[in-house]
Amino acid sequence: MNLIKREQAIAELDHAALFLDARLLDAAGQRIDAALRRDPDLAQAWEAKARLQLMRGDGAGALTALDRHDLIAPQRRDAPGPAMLRAAALAACGMIAMATTRMEQLAAAFPGDAQFQRSLAGLHLGAQQNHEATAPLRAAARLSPGDHIVVRAMAQHVHDEEAIDVLMNRKDPVSRLRAARRCRAIERLADARALYDALLEEHRDDAGLWREAGEAMMQMGELSAAIARLRRSVALGGPGARGAWSALGEAHLRKGRIAEAGACWRRATRQALHAAEAWAGLVVCAQLTGRTRLQKRAEAWLSTHASRAERRKLLAKHWQAAAAAAATRPDAAHSPLQALLTESAAKLQHAAEQQPGRADAHYHLGVCREAMGESEQAQAAADTALSINRQYAAARRLSMRLKGAALRRAA
C-alpha cells in the first residue's frame, strides 16, 4: 500500500461523502473515481461507489461495486454499512426475498439498531407480508419513539392494544386521529371519545373530524351528542362533510324522529357518497309515515343502483334502528312501526311455512322477530336458516347477535 496515495484517495472520499449527502451525484462520482485511480484497493471507495450507484437507481451496478468491496475486504462484508447497501441493492434489482433474508440477518445481529428494523418492516410491507412486518415495526417504534413514520405505520398495520397506546401518547394529531379510529374499531369507545374531543379543540373547522366524532358518539349510543357533532359537520360543509347527512339521518331514526331522519336522508340523496344508505332510509321513513309515492321512488332507485344483498343489509339495518327507537317509547305498542312489524311477521311466517327450504325466508322472519323483541322466536328462525344453509353469513351474524344479547340479559 502506498500511504501517500491512500491519504489522497481518502481525501477524495471525504469530499465525495459530502457531495452524496447533498445529492450532488455527478460531483460525488468524479471524486470517487479519482479516489479509485489513486488507490483501487480502497474498500471504502467501492462502498461509496455502491452507494452512488444505488442513489442513481442502478441496483446491478451497486452489487458489482459491493462484490469488489467484499473481495478486497472480506472482513467488512457483514459490517452494517456494506450489508445494508447489499440488501438495498438486492431490493432495487427486484430480489426481494434475498434482500429480506439479508435484512433479517442484520436485524438479528444488531437488535438495537432501529434502521435495520425499519428497513425490514418496509421490505415485508412491500411484499404484502403485513403480518411479518408487525415485529420489526414494534421493535423500531420502541428503539426510536420519535420516528413518526414508524409509529403511524404501526397504527395502520399493527392492530392491538400496544400499538394504540403508543399512538395515544403521541403529540402529532395524525397519530392521535389514527388512535381514535383504532379505539373505535376495538370498542375502546371512552378513549375514542377523549381523543376526538381533544382533536376537535385543536381543529374546530374540520368538517370530516366532526363527522367522525359524531359517528363515534352514535356508536356509543349517545345520540344527542352525535346529532350535535354531525350538525356541526354539515354546517361547515365541504368534502369532509360528505356522508354526514346520511349519518345524521341514522341518528335521528335511532331517536325515533322519523320526519327529521327522512329530511336528512333526502339531503343525502343529493350526494354521491352513501346514496344507497340514504335511499334505503327513505324507504323506511316513507313507509312509516304513509308516503307511498316517496316509498316507491326510493325502492325504484335501490332496485336500479344497489345489489339485492346490499338492499337487504341496508333495509334490515334501518328497520332494526327504527324498531329499537319505537320500543323505548310509551306508545310503542300502538306505533305505526309496530303495526308494520306485526303485519310483516305474519307474511314472513306464512312464506316460511309455504317454502320451508328457503333459508332467506327464515332469516328475514328472524330479523323481523328480533325487531319486535321476540328473541326466542328470532333465534329459532335464525337456527332454521343456518340448518338449511350453513354458509349464510347474515343468518350466522343474526344468531350470534341474539345469543350475545341472551347472555347479557342472563348476566
Image (tube, grey):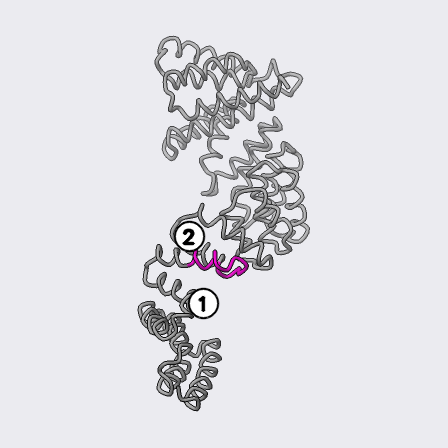
**Badge 1 amino acid:** Ala
Q: Position of residue 88 (x, y in %)?
A: 39, 64
Query: Is 110 one of the magenta-colored residues?
Result: yes
Instruction: Tell whether 257 sits left or right of 109.
Output: right
Estimate the spatial distance between the alpha carbons at disc 1 and disc 2, rounded to whole Å.
22 Å
Quadrant for the C terminus in the image: top right
* Circle 1 residue: 79
Q: Tell me the crowding category of disc 2: few under 14, some 14 to 19, or many 20 or more residues within 10 angstroms, Cα based.
A: some
Q: Identify the residue at horizontal 47%, vertical 13% (top origin).
A: 380
- Describe the element under mark 1 as helix, strand or loop: loop
> On the rendered image, what quadrant is the N terminus found in?
bottom left
Looking at the image, which residue is at 61% across and 49% down? 166
In the rendered structure, the answer to whether residue 399 lies left or right of residue 188 reads left
Q: Earlier in the sequence, mark 1 or mark 2?
A: 1
Which of label 1 and label 2 is nearer to you?
1
Inspect the magenta stretch and tell me whether residue 17 lies in it: no
From the top left corner, tell me how far across and down residue 358 is, in percent. 36, 16
Q: Image check: 352 left or right of 208?
A: left
- Look at the magenta stretch and give its main secondary structure: helix
Q: Which residues are magenta?
A: 103-116
Task: Please tell me which residue lies in front, 128 or 140.
Answer: 140
The residue that mark 2 highlights is 124
Q: Is residue 87 above or below residue 324?
A: below
Q: Secondary structure at mark 2?
A: helix
